[in-house]
Image (spheres, rainbow, N blue to C red):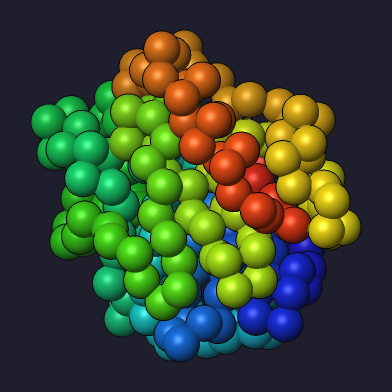
Amino acid sequence: MLKKITNSIWKLNLDSNMYFLEVEQKILIDTGSRMKRELLKMFLPKMIALDKIEKVIFTHLHYDHIGNADLFPNAKFFASKQEIKDFRENPELTVLNADILAKSGLQKIELKPIVDMNGLKVINTPGHTRGSICLWYEKEKVLFTGDTFFSGNLRSSPTAGKSCLDHLCLGRTDLPTSIDTEMKNSIEKLRKLDFKIVCPGHDY
């Protein structure tokens, strides 16, 4: 359930994956599925108290990635400008689940446009959604892909790099805010990175 990826990164699988990073600040990438809420409350505090999370970064705003946003009362929340724009124009279409949207408290949260921060470089990767992002932590050569890629295979050898992408599954591009025509360009951006570990949005 809770797995150490590097000395500063931990993964918590709650249908979709969450990543806790202790890199200058205490950061969470995505907040997991609402249906696994009790497991989140059980396992994440083994690493960090929920009220100590300083930043939450959303790779995109689908319901299985924002489901527990309300558990982090002292965090600042970030997403891409495009994802925030789509959310403001049509929250339900962006999140894809009206019930979880209401319960998550996302509409009461101030979403800030993300910029490079704490050693994390933001890579705009439209495809799965118009505003999808990946995050590149160059210090440890870790790539967080959100739902641009799905896979449970974390590669750690220095030569995995670009060839690793050939063994991963692409995220869907048939959803309301998907943009299928941009996915190829997004993948090519990622191929240019010298990553050693891929941290995907789902383990399938």
Where's residue 162, x and y in %? 72, 40
| Camera-nearest residue between 59 and 195 | 195
- Residue 106 or residue 11, whichever sits in front: 11
Answer with the quarter of the image where residue 56 lies: bottom left
Q: Is residue 162 left or right of residue 40?
A: right
Asked whether 99 or 201 is in front, the reply is 201
Residue at image point 41% right, 47% down: 123
Q: Is residue 151 visible in the rendered structure shown here?
A: no
Instruction: Answer whether residue 76 is visible to the viewer in this image.
Output: yes
Position in image of residue 50 (x %, y %): 48, 80
The image quarter containing residue 93 is top left
| Quadrant into which the C terminus falls | top right
Q: Residue at x 20, y 60 (%)?
A: 112
The N terminus appears in which quarter of the rendering? Answer: bottom right
Residue found 50% across the figure and 37% down from its top: 189
Q: Position of residue 94 (x, y in %)?
A: 30, 31
